[in-house]
Amino acid sequence: MTRIIDIVGLHFRYPGAPSDALAGLDLRVDEGEFLAVVGANGSGKSTLARLLGGLAKPSGGHEARVAGHDLLTDQGRRSARRAVGVLFQNPENQLVAEHVEEDIAFGLENLATPAPEIRARVDQMLERFQLTDLRRRQPHLLSGGQQQRTALAGVLAIPRRLLVLDEPTAMLDPAGRDEVLAAVARERADGLAVVYITQEMDEVLSADRVVALDGGAVAFDGTPTELFAEVALIRRLSLGLPAAAGVALSLIEGGKRLESLPLTLDDLVDALLGADGTQLDLGALLGGDQP
């Protein structure tokens, strides 16, 4: 398997800061892998996103290669900006044009792509992200989910080897969140390597692997199931649990006997049925009308 990220001992410190935002971080990601990155505020997640995209200069490191480009050099960072697409949590900060189709074309125009190729690529992105009917819409008139899909289409209009998303659903309502997650899932299914930074633990469950940061270093590296099995670590890092696991843990702490900690609602139902042969009212349990 070809490695898309190969980082050893990476450091970054903001000017005037008393300590490193990233402190000797090690990270390896393979082509096509979907990596979730979690951590409390200030753990270094957004700093990592900027460094992976070549948008900031590391303070130092033994090795820092992304998509074959050396982030420790000026040329390597410039090349990384072309190979790595970065999407941040506020789409309005990445929408720069008057209309949706113009925004998607913006990066291609900056690369002096021939006009016929730009038109073809924009049409492709509009269809791929379900934006065709909105092509002449002004971005500020879009919903949050539509804005984020437009920003993502613009990022990926330029062919990329790696997509880095920094809490892309943090400012969205549930419908917008679902739109963006579906769009990311399609890119992942097509084999694009994804680094997905989030504080929403339910979004971690579909990742191949999850890395938890603490104080700018890796505190955990394993599967989502392995992470959420370490409840003491979850609490120490202030990460929280997926919704179903949180409910299950409350039940366990209240005396309910479950063989393992379920991570999804389906798993929770199965665990409860297996525990006593009866189905509980999960709607009431979760504080709503629907399970």
Image (cartoon, helix red, strand yellow):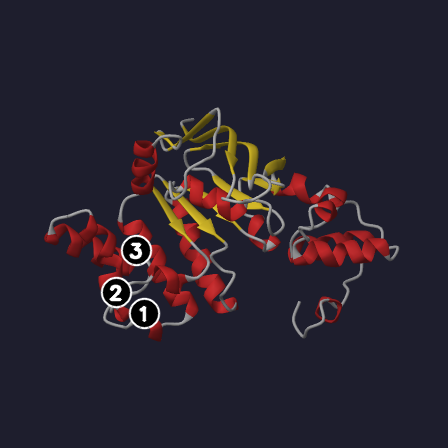
Direction from residue 69 to residue 250 in the image, left or right: right
227 over 106 or under it: above or below: above
Q: Give how far across and how far down residue 291 sits, in percent.
A: 66, 67
Of the image marks 1 and 2, the number of the one nearer the N terminus:
2
77 over 96 or under it: above or below: above
Instruction: Read off the residue under disc 3.
Output: 154
Which residue is at the front of the view, 274 or 267?
267
Dot 3: within a 10 Å radius of its alpha carbon, few (fewer than 14), some, or many (20 or more) residues? many
Q: Amino acid at mark 1?
A: Pro
Instruction: Read off the residue under disc 1.
Output: 139
Which image quarter holds the N terminus? top left
Q: What's the distance in space between the residues labelled 1 and 2, CA to CA?
A: 8 Å
Of the image marks 3 and 1, the number of the one nearer the N terminus:
1
Q: Amino acid at mark 3?
A: Gly
Toward the right, the furthest residue is 255
Q: Amino acid at mark 2?
A: Ala
Badges 3 and 1: C-beta atoms under 8 Å apart? no
Toward the top, the furthest residue is 62
Dot 1: within a 10 Å radius of its alpha carbon, few (fewer than 14), some, or many (20 or more) residues? many
Direction from residue 271 to residue 166 in the image, left or right: left
Which residue is at the front of the view, 230 or 290?
230
Q: What's the distance in space between the residues labelled 3 and 1, CA to CA?
A: 12 Å
